[in-house]
Image (cartoon, rainbow, N blue to C red):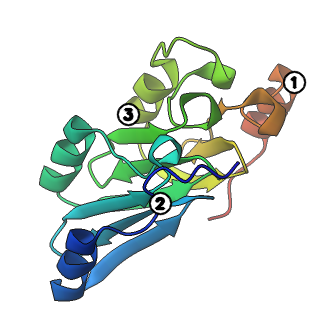
Amino acid sequence: GYNDNNSSMPDETRAALEAAPGIAWLVAAGSAFAAVTTQGRWYTWGSLDEGGSMPDETRAALEVAPGIARLEATSYAFAAVTTEGRWYTWGSSSLGGMMSWGGTMPNTNDTRVALEAAPGIAWLVASEGAFAAVTTDGRWYTWGDSRRGGSMPDETRAALEAAPGIAR
């Protein structure tokens, strides 16, 4: 839902984005935005608990990353993967902002560890409250709210992973 806790773009963010030489990424969640300049600076605004406030340590890590391979949003959270394969999520923890199997709490980091060990990412997509990722070696991962797709049944995962390939 809508949560108006500092949802408008701050003047300093607007000025910084207008002064930037270009925007590499601009992604919207339901009530928040994330923008990345071509120089690698990150800006988020909107509903603070739905991704509009990125943790300082996440921002610092992403701003020194060599590049962003994927950036997606649910209605309540964001997921970014760097070109070197590091994963970052923020926003509503139960709706995709915290990586774990099937939206369970606390975050065990099983999904993050598995994805960071993968040879590459073929797909990263989002539903209203969950993410799904497919690695280039055909493994399937989901996280977020189980009612919104964050928990894939084992038989579905097994069938998809046994399929002959993933089209990009």
Q: Locate residue 38 relative to residue 69 in the image: left or right.
A: left
Q: Locate residue 30 relative to residue 92 in the image: left or right.
A: right
Q: Are marks 1 and 2 in contact (CB under 8 Å)?
A: no
Circle 1: residue type: Glu
Q: How many marks?
A: 3
Q: Between 32 and 106, which is closer to the camera in this rendering?
A: 32
Q: Locate residue 151 relative to residue 16 in the image: left or right.
A: right
Circle 3: residue type: Glu
- State whether residue 110 is above or below residue 130: above
Circle 2: residue type: Ser
Which dot, 2 or 3, sits closer to the camera? Answer: 2
- State whether residue 43 is above or below residue 17: above
The residue sitting at 83% across, 32% down in the picture is: 147
In terms of sequence position, does the residue under pointer 1 or pointer 3 come before the other? 3
- Disc number at residue 116? 3
Marks 1/2: CA–CA distance: 41 Å
Secondary structure under the numbered disc 1 in the rendered image: helix
- Disc number at residue 155? 1
Q: Quadrant of residue 112?
A: top left
Q: Which residue is mark 2?
A: 7
